[in-house]
Amino acid sequence: MKWVDLPPVWLVVFAVIAWLQATQFPFGLSLAHPVTMLLAGVLVGGGIVLTLLAVMEFRRHKTTIIPHETPDSLIQSGIFARSRNPIYLADVLILAGLCLWWDAVLALVLVPVLAWVLEKRFIIPEENRMRRHFRADFARYEQKVRRWL
């Protein structure tokens, strides 16, 4: 059951709901436009790039990427110098891009819902663990780098 409680699983569930809304319940709503498709591509592509940049930092620092585990080191370099949670930000960007790509207008409401789920279920507990583990280092990091952007 533990594998279900991982951010990529939540992203897939939300994406499936968005796709179902687009294909089964469009209700005649549409944002279809070349600019929308471009924005969708930028969002999905940006999310993938953010994820790759974050994964590279995890590998470089030889620490865990698993959300429910305490990392061995506090990553403050690379993309983590701009966002404390670039992978979660990437998940939200990817969902927003998929909603636009599939023209799932009503499913766009899922984007802030996913952000809320990620924050409550993963980010806050992770930051509390890191606050206890890294103490002053995390306090300084938290002061200079925002949670999302």
Image (cartoon, helix red, strand yellow):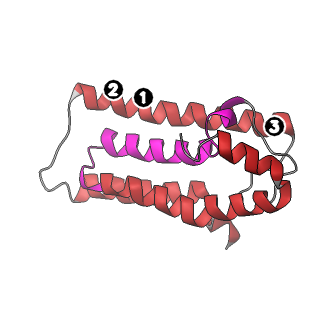
Label 1, label 3: how far apart the Cα atoms are: 25 Å
Q: Which kind of residue does numbered mark 1 sit on?
A: Val
- Write the residue at 39% across / 40% down: 97
Circles 3, 2 touching at the beta carbon (< 8 Å): no
Q: Are marks 1 and 3 in contact (CB under 8 Å)?
A: no
Q: Main secondary structure of the magenta part?
A: helix
Residue 102 position, x and y percent, is: 31, 43
Residue 59: x and y in percent read 81, 37
Q: Amino acid at mark 2?
A: Leu
- Per the image, the residue denoted by label 3 is 59
Asked if residue 118 lies left or right of residue 99, the reply is right
Magenta stretch: includes residue 104: yes
Which residue is the extreme one toward the left? 28
Question: Which callout, 3 or 2, points at the residue further toward the start of the chain?
Answer: 2
In three-dimensional space, the C-alpha distance between marks 1 and 2, rounded to whole angstroms, equals: 6 Å
Part of the protein shown in magenta: 78-107
Q: Amino acid at mark 3?
A: Arg
